Image: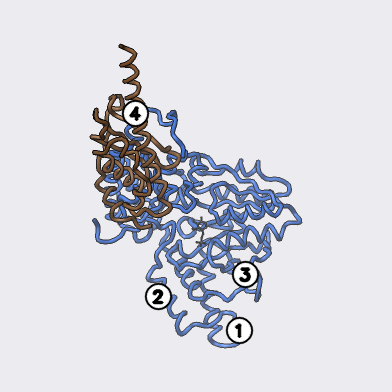
Amino acid sequence: MAYSNKVIDHYQNPRNVGSLDQNDPQVGTGIVGAPECGDVMKLQIRVDDQGRVTDAKFKTFGCGSAIASSSLATEWVKGRTLEEAEQLKNTEIVKELALPPVKIHCSVLAEDAVRAAIADVRRKQEARTSAGAGAR
Amino acid sequence: MAQKLIYLDNAATTPVDPRVLEVMLPYYRENFGNSASRNHQFGWVAEEATENARKQVAAVINADPKEIIWTSGSTESNNLAILGAARMYADKGRHLVTSLIEHKAVIDPCKFLQSQGYEVTFLQPDNKGRVSVEQVREALRPDTVLVSLMFANNEIGTIHPIPEIGALCHEKGVLFHTDATQAFGKVPVDVEAMQIDLLSMSAHKIYGPKGVGALYVRRKKPRVRLEPVIYGGGHERGMRSGTLNVPGIVGFGEAARIAKEEMPAESKRLAGLRDRMWAGLSEHLTDIARNGDPQHCLPNILNVSFLYVEGESLMMGFSDIAVSSGSACTSASLEPSYVLKNIGLGDDLAHSSIRFSLGRFTTTEEVDYTIKSVVRTVNHLRAMSPLYEMAQAGIDLSKVEWQHH
Ligand SMILES: Cc1ncc(COP(=O)(O)O)c(C=O)c1O
């Protein structure tokens, strides 16, 4: 199977590889997939007080399309608000990377990773507000 | 990037040796006759050619030329051996013994027989891919008619204890078939010394043409009879009808001749390159594991798991080198290699494995270039692998609760 040029580009020059501090209250972490299934994605976002994603990082174990999907997802969520980031659809990833049908699951996984990271940071924010309320 | 593609997938298929092609060509042109035409020169020339090839192929395994049946390849040879023996000896019994790491061309005919009321025992090899004689002995029953175990495995190169299993089968009066597709022409095979009754071979794994193979069928002690799979004009002692692929068979014969002649030097050279590859990878990379049995293996196959990186993404990093992966992503089934799973590798390790299979035209420079490319790619991918990061942090990956999807 031949890869699209965009997949190859993300594979060779992945954007935003790395890790953020998982314990930072402004960082949301999503880890999806399983080694036995052949792909694991870790996607992290840092969110400022206005609820905007200021940074995003990923690490992925998986095929080239999985790497490219998560790399692209980090690029797309940066600068968006959480509400906007939540709108990210796997079909957009499929289109942008020209993924063949057998690789659609890679884009689904990237979407899941974004959602998991958003959910994580929201949970932290809620915990903080309720903790703050309780202190008063 | 190298200018030229490097081919390290010789267990999948091999290029036709130019010397082989040379001897084939006249049989497409002027010597186009049908070897079954008994009444003119065209037929005689063709027949002489296929009979000469029969001698050449028989010589590699110490068989009598009369014991060679031409087929379209090992898939057909395996089907003929297994279905043919099971049907011919159904009155004697309906039990077969094979292993879990056979090629699909053995497993699927066995499964078909199961659907027809036969019983099949699939032996589980050890973690190096070997089935022991004791396992076979324990599996044998009074109604066992056939044991089918591959000579050498196509993914990991492990060689089974063939002579011991052959002796056991003969002692018990059970027929012994071996799929020798990967071993034929690469390591010594002797149907007499090893007491083999049926043996599958294929031309395209030994620098011959695709779509040509043979089945060795023992004629004496015991005389093996097979119910054909293909019926027709009664060619090949009635066991395989159909006009012979004369140019292909001529090519197979020449390929067999060359393989036999060059085997002593070539198997040493290949083992040297394989060891060089493993040494080079081990020197530059941590967390890699060699799959198979280094004590009992083909000289040309090296199967390696690169922990924390996925096989298809690895292959993408050295796209100028052709190899095979145990990863699901490269197969239509989306299942990782059943061979690796059945020698006890977890799915995660199976996803991380690569098979390098070297061949006649592989050079030292190619091996060195491959080592460099693989090391660079593994490092590139580990830098972005969440599994590598977790392992480095001391997390036991088997204890993590993953989100299966
Ligand atoms: C062990 C083994 N058996 C059988 C086959 C099938 O051989 P053929 O391609 O000649 O049908 C192969 C090759 O893929 C093989 O490696």
Tell me if the residue at label 1 has its CB under 8 Å from ligand 1: no
**In which quadrant of the rendered view does residue B233 lie?**
bottom right
Whole-number angstrom distance, CA of label 1 to CA of label 2: 26 Å
Q: Are marks 1 and 2 on the same chain?
A: yes
Disc 4 from disc 1: Cα separation:
86 Å
Q: Is residue B301 left or right of residue B150?
A: left
B216 over B268 or under it: above or below: below
Distance between mark 3 and mark 4 Cα atoms: 70 Å
Q: Amino acid at mark 4?
A: Arg
How packed mark 4 is, by other alpha carbons closer than 10 Å (few <14, some 14-19, many 20 or more), is some
The three-letter amino acid code for the residue at tag 3 is: Arg
Q: Quadrant of the N terminus of chain B?
A: bottom left
Q: Are marks 3 and 1 on the same chain?
A: yes
Q: Which residue is mark 4?
A: A122
Amino acid on which disc 1 is placed: Arg
The image's mark for residue B240 is: 3
Q: Residues within 10 Å of mark 1 (few under 14, many from 20)?
A: few
Q: In the rendering, what colour is chain A?
A: brown
**Residue B38: mark in rendering:** 1
Q: Do marks 3 and 2 both belong to one polypeptide chain?
A: yes
Hey, which residue is sitting farthest bottom in the picture? B40
The reply, left or right, for residue A106 in relation to residue B372 is right
